[in-house]
Amino acid sequence: MKRNMITIIGPTASGKTQLASHLAADYIIEGVPAEIISGDSRQVYRGMDIGTGKDLQDYHIERDGMVIDVPCHLVDICNPGEKYNIFEYQTDFLNVWQNIQERGVLPILCGGSGLYVESVIRNYNLSPVPKNDALRNELQSKSMTELTEILMRLKKLNNSDMHNKTDVDSPQRAIRAIEIEQYNSEHTTEDRTFPVIDTVVFGVDIPREFRREKISSRLKNRIDEGMVDEIRRLLSQGVEPDDLIYYGLEYKYVTEYVIGRRSYDDMLSELETRIHQFAKRQMTWFRGMERRGIKIHWIDAMLPMEDKVKKIKELYSH
């Protein structure tokens, strides 16, 4: 079977988006049209730019006097405050992937949301899960420890890989995860036709200390670029604080600072710690993908861009 997609994954601040864009540009220069499909669970939201690290300039490549704007899909597709989920991602991904295939374009899936990426390359058969208000009301008074125990019990019952307890960092997220697992334990998942995607998966391997330096530096840059103002703007547009907090990391801690729950120094210190922990969890997920049978070709992040692109193209063509 002919391979029909390149996948690039990596932890936050590893440079995966830049790599995907340079790779796509290289193919385009050679006359092979290529487009990027985002595999990021938060970059789907419009107006949430700095905190999600969209770095849209990364898709703008200048090479040998040429300017190439690499097309990117599944960024800015829904409004802040909405609760985008993995089923919607699968549906949107398939629509984009099939359109790209029909046009004879090479798709490059790039992102750090391991569950989203794995759901499409392993053909997870998921179904939409409706809200269960009765269950939500029942769980509202539970502690985070109790919610985690309930979720783990349901996961064991369902033999489910869908959620990782380290990814559930707020009661809202935990309750939604329980809602999904509860529904799946009571309903047979609908059969949905999922095309066979034969992808070669590449991971950006960045040394831990260098990753930590980049995360700390990037956080400072994001604050300087106006991340606090971005949160204030979203709140002024009517997005509820709890909805922003639901998105975690930058949106959780900066929102809590803006509404007076945290001091500035506490926000900055706690957020930096949480982003480092998040990057570690991402790597744990990717290692789990390998244990679940996905071959990942690790690319040294410290190599020159030209060498990284060349290595990916060589491995993909073999």
Image (cartoon, rainbow, N blue to C red):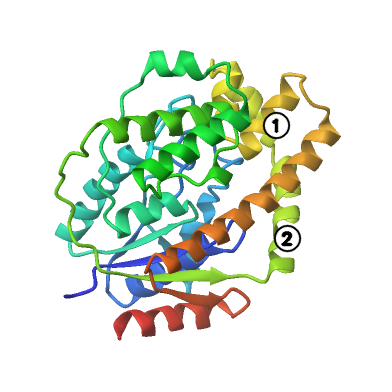
Residue at mark 2 to residue at mark 1: CA–CA distance: 20 Å
Evaluate whether residue 116 shows in this view: yes
Taking the spot 75% from the left edge, 26% from the top edge, the residue there is 257
The residue identified by callout 1 is 254
Question: As drawn, is 53 to the left or to the right of 267?
Answer: left
Residue 212, disc: 2
* Residue 41, image x, y percentages: 46, 43
Residue 17, disc: none
- Mark 2 and mark 1 lie on one chain; the one further toward the N terminus is 2
Viewer-side residue, 225 vs 63? 225
Taking the spot 63% from the left edge, 77% from the top edge, the residue there is 302
Evaluate whether residue 47 shows in this view: no
In the displayed structure, 183 sits above or below 204; it is above
Q: Quadrant of the N terminus?
A: bottom left
Q: Within 10 angstroms of label 2, few (less than 14), some, or many (20 or more) residues?
A: many
Q: Amino acid at mark 2?
A: Arg
Q: Amino acid at mark 1?
A: Val
Q: Secondary structure at mark 1?
A: helix
* Residue 56, image x, y percentages: 51, 50
* Residue 142, image x, y percentages: 58, 21
Q: What number of labels is visible?
A: 2
* Residue 267, image x, y percentages: 78, 34
Viewer-side residue, 25 vs 192? 192
Q: Secondary structure at mark 2?
A: helix
Specify the quadrant of the image occupied by residue 250: top right
Question: As drawn, is 14 to the left or to the right of 80?
Answer: right
Specify the quadrant of the image occupied by residue 140: top right
In the displayed structure, 124 sits above or below 32; it is above
